[in-house]
Amino acid sequence: MNDERLLVAALPLYLGELSKIVNGLNQHYSRLQKALDSEQIKDEATKELLEEVMIFIKREIDSLKNIYKASKNIYKALIRNISNKKQDLSKNSY
């Protein structure tokens, strides 16, 4: 199996795992936002820490989304390359 075909086989698995991570982080972010909005947390230092953690999580989510998009574009390009190669081979075989 050549490198392109190996990547085509592996990238969907990678994208799936990346998606799970982003979804999990989104869930944690939502829970933290609900806790902050509920006003059950009275301590200002805890609120500030919670806000800092939420900023960190949001940055990580954004970064992972960019990685996901770039990886998906690579996947699409690989599929096109393989398809083009197959077409070239079929043209040359006649």
Image: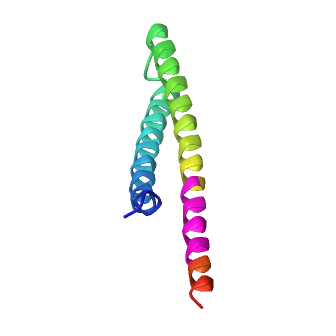
Q: State the residue in front, 60 or 36.
A: 60
Residue 5, horizontal then vertical, whole percent: 43, 63
Q: Is residue 30 magenta?
A: no
Instruction: Give the answer, above or below, for where 83 lies relative to 54.
Output: below
Instruction: Give the answer, above or below, for where 34 lies relative to 44.
Output: below
- Quarter the C terminus occupies: bottom right
Q: What residue span does the magenta drawing correspond to?
A: 74-86
Q: Quadrant of residue 55?
A: top right
Q: State the residue in front, 4 or 88.
A: 88
Residue 71, horizontal then vertical, whole percent: 54, 49
Q: Is residue 84 magenta?
A: yes
Q: Residue at x 44, y 55 (%)?
A: 11
Q: Residue at x 55, y 77 (%)?
A: 86
Residue 17, horizontal then vertical, whole percent: 39, 50
The residue sitting at the top extreme is 45
- Quarter the N terminus occupies: bottom left
Residue 44, horizontal then vertical, whole percent: 49, 9
Instruction: Give the answer, above or below, for where 92 lies relative to 40.
Output: below
Q: Residue at x 54, y 58 (%)?
A: 75
Position of residue 42 in the picture relative to residue 78 (left or right)? left
Instruction: Give the colouring mode of the picture.
Output: rainbow
Magenta portion: prevailing SS class:
helix
